[in-house]
Amino acid sequence: MKRLLLLSTLPLLAVASILLGQAPAASTLRTPNGDKPLSVIHQGSQTYFAVDEVIAALGGTVRQESGGFKAALSGVEAAFGPDSRFAVVRDDLIEMPVPPLSAAGKPYATLQFFQGYLSRAAALDATWDAAGHILMIRPLQQTQVSVGTSLANVQGITKVVLTLSGPADYVIVKEPGAYTIRFKSPIRAPYADQAHDDPNVSKLSFSGNDLRIQLTSPDVIADAYKLDNPFRVVLDLRKGTASTTAPASQLPMPTKPVEAPGIRTIVIDPGHGGKDVGAIGPDGTTEKDLTLAVCRKLASALGARTGARIVLTREDDSVVSLDQRTAIANQYKADLFLSVHMNAAVVKGARGSETYFLSADASDEIAKKAAESENASVSAAASPSSDLKLILWDLAQQSYLQESSRFATDIQEEMNAVAGIQNRGVKQAPFKVLVGATMPAALVEVAFISNPEEEAKLKSDAFVTTVVDAITRAVVKYKTDYETRIGVIKPPPPAPAAPATTTTTAATRTGT
Amino acid sequence: MRRAAVVVLALVVLAAGCRKKSEQTGNLNVQNNVAPRAARLYFEGPSLLLMAEQRNVQAPQNPAGAMAVVVRELFKGPANPGFARAFPADTVVRGAFLLPDGTGFVDLGGATLTQGWATGSHEELMAVYSLVQTITANFPEAKRVRILVNGTPAETLAGHVALDRSLVPSAAFLDPRAR
């Protein structure tokens, strides 16, 4: 009986000990509005503060939404959940060392949440006096600038972005194997050290008002520039000493473009059509109608500006399969293929244009298929299968990736120049409509039809004309550059005062 | 006597068969044993790139069984209201399996994907790569992912991303902070 009692009590004790470990302790919240008691949970090395109590003391609210919470203060919302170390404030992320907790329906978060959120919503700072058990909320020091970092590597270039809470003066110091950004005013660092598995950057370290970017090798060089709204310092780091890309002479040139006499046929592909309506805007506008409207105008403009034969994959609201679209381009022996689309995203506020060419993961698959075909070469040679044909198509496309990248870059640069369109850059993706095209091929996403502002713009003739003009300039530029490279157009004699853009414009006029 | 010998032999064979079956069943029981595991799930963040949420799920210990459970957890959507669900809300997991060559297969269904998903390339890319990233991040055995719709190879989900080949994770769609 005694044993039975002990056994039945053990689970209760275990639960009680867990609860004791998480039980909110009495602490003080000190805000400009006065002192209040505050629930605090200590778990491991972390200290969590009751979000609803802090936000309510400052005049804000916290509510439950889906599996997480939303705080609102001074018209600024913060979304956070128990499974993620990140809180979302507007389009920005606040990084915490551990995810928030939910205890008895109340959210608890670490100090970093309050520092990140309160500085953005109400220019307030949060500090924790562990000895006195006081969470202090007070106006942010005007001179202190919060710094956030992000790092991404795209095509060998590492982009380190420092997002600042306000403007700050700084100098960049080059040291052996590192760059140091030395801020001239006090900064709040998000962390001490952060290691990175990146080809160019091994570690970011904050010390005092310095951010040290530790490089993987001494031959990594950097371009730095500033951006506003929000204030950002961007460093593009890459290996090499001179240009951003490898010299053209070192790049493998695709076989067919060298042999071709120039850009004589261009296939324009209005995305979707028929029962495939594509994306639908909040006002009911369909992607298929917009792509057709843009492409009809584009075909007319390109015909006039380039003198090339322009072919549309569809001229009305008909269904054309993705394979048929590239088959049309291949049948016409097109020298250039451009698919035109309108974008959509579930995230509110998504906007801007982006241009794609075929991705490396598609190429990986091509390599795998090629290896498989070598293993099965005897049977394949005896009877060429549809798989082998597919491999040959894919290999042909792979040889055009370099040219597709140039073409996509030209398109995106011109789209960037279109007033009011946010640049989302050149990207790579395994898009079906690009897979089978045996010529330089790109897909442009003009704007987000899911965004009410951009949907309204896309319905205006003036905006469509601006977009068509931008794409036309890009195609003319690519055509001129390409034909100059292969010797169809002679480059103009070098003039000391004439920059590259002037040369392009002059050649364009000659071409038209 | 001869009849008795046949019966004894039959019983011996039957007993041997039972022992073998019992061992197999034992292994299967271990494989199907449901245990808690941490799942890293990828959703669209405010940067329009994928962010991760860490969640505990009850899943079988065999990878293929666990894969379906983890993907179903992904389709429940994010806990953080600042993140967005990448797939249509009515998407279901019909099945998942893993080939010895490291290809994870996921068979999807649901009204939207069956009738044709009317959306842009960005949303489609986020959906496809949230799935690819979730599977390859949680199952090291899965090096690549092949997506089926209603049990058959699909050309695309919404007219853009080619699904006639297996896909590998792409850092281009992942927020650097989610790594």
Image (cartoon, coloured by chain):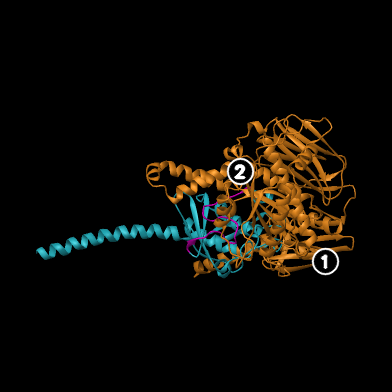
Chain colours: A orange, B cyan
Dot 1 falls on a residue whose secondary structure is: loop
Amino acid type at mark 2: Leu
Q: Residue at x 86, y 49 (%)?
A: A166
Q: Left or right of A248: which side holds A331? A: left
Mark 2 residue element: helix
Q: Which residues are magenta?
A: B151-171
Mark 1 belongs to which amino acid?
Gly
- Alpha carbon of mark 1 to alpha carbon of mark 2: how far? 53 Å
Q: Which residue is mark 2?
A: A401
Which of the image's four quarters has the N terminus of chain B? bottom left
Q: Residue furthest left?
A: B1
Point 65% across, 38% down: residue: A199
Q: Position of residue A468 (x, y in %)?
A: 74, 54
Q: Quadrant of residue A202?
A: top right
Q: Chain of mark 1?
A: A
Q: Is residue A268 above or below residue A501?
A: below
Residue B155 is at least partly visible in this image: yes
- Depth check: A74 or A255 in front? A255
Of marks 1 and 2, which one's residue comes earlier in the chain?
A: 1
Q: Residue at x 45, y 51 (%)?
A: A386
Front-most of A185 and A296?
A296
Chain containing the residue with disc 2? A
Quarter-of-image position of residue A363: top right
Q: Nearer the viewer, mark 1 or mark 2?
A: 2
Residue linked to disc 1: A60
